[in-house]
Amino acid sequence: MSIDVNNESGTEVDERAILDIARYALTRMRIHPLSELSVIVVDAGAMEQLHMQWMDLPGPTDVMSFPMDELRPPSKDDDEPPQGLLGDVVLCPEVAARQAEEAPTRHSMDEELQLLTVHGVLHLLGYDHEEPDEKAEMFGLQSAIVDGWRAEQGVPGPSPAPTVS
């Protein structure tokens, strides 16, 4: 899998963890190993511009996803996953830091960015949380992926509670 992490934010983030959890999520979702993903970390000003341009909403947000080939996980275990360009996940550490501090299970900005990376990847794979049943499916899968990755890393405890909007 080709995953690029480009930090343009000016904030120090754990790029290795972002890369690792993105790879873990894509592997767990059975995405073709030759697929490509880009993760871009931007400051609040850049995120606000993207948020306004693409969602017509003011202010910066935590994560945005821009799918390319609209890849989906294979429907059966024996199906061959398609190969292609997944797209871009854009993260904002300033918003992530605020959300991490305000969350009921206070955690670090980097933990929030890991959660948001998985959230963004799931959006690229067609998951959404507009309807209650979609939200339950997406957030359940998100928690399972983050918890699985954290267990592999030897990090104790459950994943942070979802704080994404």
Image: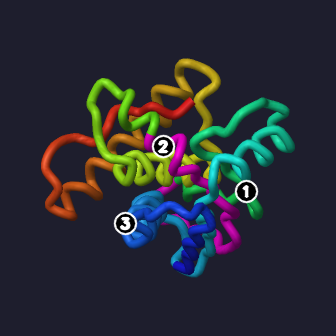
User: Counting residues from the N terminus, which is met first, the one under dot 2 or under dot 3?
Assistant: 3
Reading the image, the residue beneath label 1 is 67
Q: Is residue 151 left or right of residue 108?
A: left
Q: Residues within 10 Å of mark 1 (few under 14, many from 20)?
A: some
Image quadrant assignment for residue 140: top left
* Residue 23, above or below 165: below
Q: Secondary structure at mark 1?
A: strand
Name the foreground residue: 89 vs 135. 89
**As shown in the figure, which amino acid type bears the numbered disc 2?**
Ala
Closest to the camera, between mark 2 and mark 1, is 2
Seen at 71% across and 48% down, the residue is 45
- Which SS class for mark 3? helix
Label 3: how many Cα within 10 Å (few below 14, some 14–19, many 20+): some
- What range of the chain is rendered magenta? 76-97
Q: Amino acid at mark 3?
A: Ala
Provide the residue designation for mark 3: 17
> What is the x, y in percent for residue 162?
41, 33
Residue 157 locus on image (x, y percent): 16, 43
For marks 3 and 1 on the same chain, the one whose residue lies earlier in the sequence: 3
Residue at 75% across, 63% down: 69
Give the CA distance from mark 3 to mark 1: 22 Å
